Image: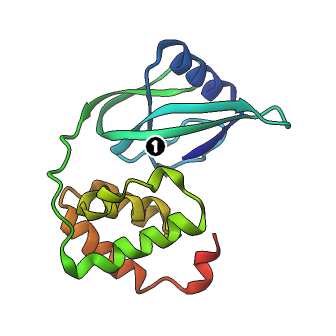
Amino acid sequence: MPLRIFEARYLDMISESLRTGAGFGISLIREGAEVGGPAACHDIGTLARIIDWQRGEDGVLEITVHGEGRFRILRTRLRKNRLLEGDIEFIDGEEDRELPVEYQLLADLLRQIAEKFSLTYLSDEEKFMQAGWVGCRLAELLPVDMGDKQILLEMNDPIRRLEQVQSILQTISMDQFAM
C-alpha cells in the first residue's frame, strides 16, 4: 500500500520505524479527523512494515508498506507529539484453506486486476488457490467503502470473507473499477 506522509507526528513515526526496523500499526479511523488532532480508531488493525520510501517532488514522504498481520488494540495513549500509540496483541493467523471451486471466479477477477494494474506483488500463482489470500487481496483492492473493508479485515473465517466479497461485488457498478 502506498502512503504519503506529511504531518510531523507521522514523519517522527516513520523515522523511528526506519531507524529501528520495527513496523507500525494502521487502523481505520472510527471517529475524528485524519489530519490534525488524534482520532478514535477501530480496535482491529494491520501491522505495516516499510518496504520502500522516497521524498516526493512536493517534499512529501512517499512510502510503500507491506501488511504483516492483524492486531487488536488493548490500550492507547497520546504522545507529546499527538501521535496515538497503543498496546496491542496479535491476532492468530487464520487457518488458510484451499479455494473452493465455487469461488474460482473471485481468483480469476483478482488475476485480471493484477494484470490490468501491473501489481507484480500478486504474481505468486500458488496463492490464487488459497481462500484466505484471495479474500484478503480482494478486500484490499476492490473499490468499496472503508467500513466494508474493516468488516472483511475483522473476519477470521476465509470462506465467510469470500462469501462477503461476493456479496459486495454484486453491489459494485462497473464504473467503480476504473480505479
Q: Residue furthest top?
A: 19
| Residue depicted at 14% across the width and 51% down the height | 95
Above or below: residue 167 compared with residue 98: below
Q: Is residue 54 left or right of residue 156?
A: right
Front-lying residue, 90 or 112: 112
| Residue depicted at 62% across the width and 42% down the height | 3
Residue 4, by quadrant, is top right
| Residue depicted at 30% across the width and 38% down the height | 71
Front-lying residue, 90 or 115: 115
Front-lying residue, 9 or 115: 115
Give how far across and how far down residue 41 sits, in percent. 43, 44
| Residue depicted at 85% across the width and 37% down the height | 58
Image quadrant for the C terminus?
bottom right
Residue 10 visible from this viewpoint: yes
Give how far across and how far down residue 37 sits, in percent. 61, 36
Above or below: residue 35 compared with residue 124: above
Q: Is residue 1 left or right of residue 56?
A: left
Residue 152 visible from this viewpoint: no
- Dot 1 crowding, Cα within 10 Å, few <14, some 14–19, many 20+: some
Which amino acid type is marked by label 1? Answer: Ala
Q: Is residue 128 left or right of residue 160?
A: right
Q: Is residue 175 left or right of residue 56?
A: left
Q: Residue furthest front?
A: 125
Give how far across and how far down residue 119 sits, in percent. 54, 56
Quickly name the residue at label 1: 40
Above or below: residue 33 compared with residue 132: above
Above or below: residue 9 compared with residue 142: above
